[in-house]
Image (tube, rainbow, N blue to C red):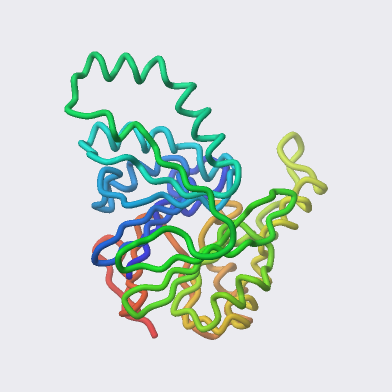
Amino acid sequence: MRLSFLGTGCPVAHPVRFGPAHLVRTAQSAVLIDCGSGVSQRLVEIGCPGRDLDAVLLTHLHSDHIVDLFQLIISSWHQGRSRPPRIYGPRGTRRYVDGLMALWRPELEQRIAHERRPSAVALQPEVHEFTAGPVGDFTDLAVEAVEVDHKPVENAFGFVFRGEGATLVLSGDTARSPALISAGAGADLLVHEVFSHRDMPVIEGVRTAEGTANVARYHTLSSEVGKVALEMGAAALALTHFVPPAADRDALLDEVRQDFAGPVILGEDLMTVDVGRRTLAWGNARLSYS
C-alpha cells in the first residue's frame, strides 16, 4: 500500500504546498482523499490521472478540501474516463455535489454537444454519504471512517486504511482525537495534520490573536502531534496539512521528536511512502526507514 502526498498545504496559497489531497494505492485500487487546489495536476505528476481513480473520499466539506472537485471531474472526462466518478463524503456531500454540477450545467451541456466525445458518463457523479464505520467496497483495500474533532465543523472524519498487510491512518482535520487513536492502534504509518503555533504570529490586517486561537483549537498543535503518534503506537509518523505552509521544518522536526522516537516524515508534495515496505520516494531520492 502506497501513500502519495499530493497537497500538503492549507487554505493559504503556496507555491510548494498545494491544497490538501492524498492518494492511496494498492495493486488493484486507487483512492483519492480530498480535492484541494491543484489536485488534478498533482495526480498527473504522480502517474495516476483522475481518469484512473476508483473513488474520491472527502474528510469534510471545508473549502480547501473540496475546492477542485469540479476540476477533477471535468479533467478526468477529458482524459477519457469511461465510468462515473464515485464520491464518498459525510452528510451534506450530495447536496454540495448536486449544486456544483447544477452550477456548471450550462457549460457542460455546451461541451458535451460541441466536443462530441464518446461518452458523458464521467460527468455523472455517484455520491455516497457515510457515517463512522466501513466505507466503500474496494477489491484489496478496507477503509474505516472515524469521526474526529474539528468543531464547529460537524461531520469531519479521519480514515483507517488496511490493505496488503499494512495499516495506514490519515487524520483529516482534527484536534487530538481519542477515537482516531483507538481505531488506528498499532498503525504502520500515521499521517497527521499539524498546526505550528510558533509560526503564526499576529499580523495586523491578516490575523488576530483571537482568530489564531480559534483555528488552533480545531487542529493539532505541533507540541501535541508526537504525543498522538506515541499513544497510538504508530510505527512511523508523517506530517501534512501544514498550518502555516511555510512552517520552520527544522524547528518542527525537533519539537515532534521530543515526544515520538520513531521515524518522523515531514510530508512534501509528490512524496510517496510504501507503508508496508517502509520506504520513501521523492524525486530521485529513496529512503528506507524502520
Task: Classify residue 29 as left or right of residue 193.
Answer: left
Image: 208 above or below 189:
above
In which quadrant of the rendered view does residue 123 lie? top left
In the image, residue 10 lies at what x, y percent? Answer: 55, 48
Image: 278 above or below 4:
below
- Going 56% across and 34% down the picture, which residue do you hit? 95
In the image, residue 86 lies at what x, y percent? Answer: 38, 46
In the image, residue 98 lies at what x, y percent? Answer: 50, 31
Residue nearest the observer in this picture, 89 or 5: 89
- Going 54% across and 85% down the picture, which residue do you hit? 261
Residue nearest the observer in this picture, 85 or 280: 85
- Going 59% across and 62% down the picture, which residue do you hit? 132
| Count of numbered marks | 0
Residue nearest the observer in this picture, 6 or 58: 58
- Going 68% across and 68% down the picture, which residue do you hit? 176
Residue nearest the observer in this picture, 62 or 116: 116
Question: In what quadrant of the picture does the C terminus appear?
Answer: bottom left
Task: Classify residue 156 as left or right of residue 25.
Answer: right
In the image, residue 215 lies at what x, y percent? Answer: 72, 51
Image: 272 above or below 69:
below
Q: Residue furthest right?
A: 210
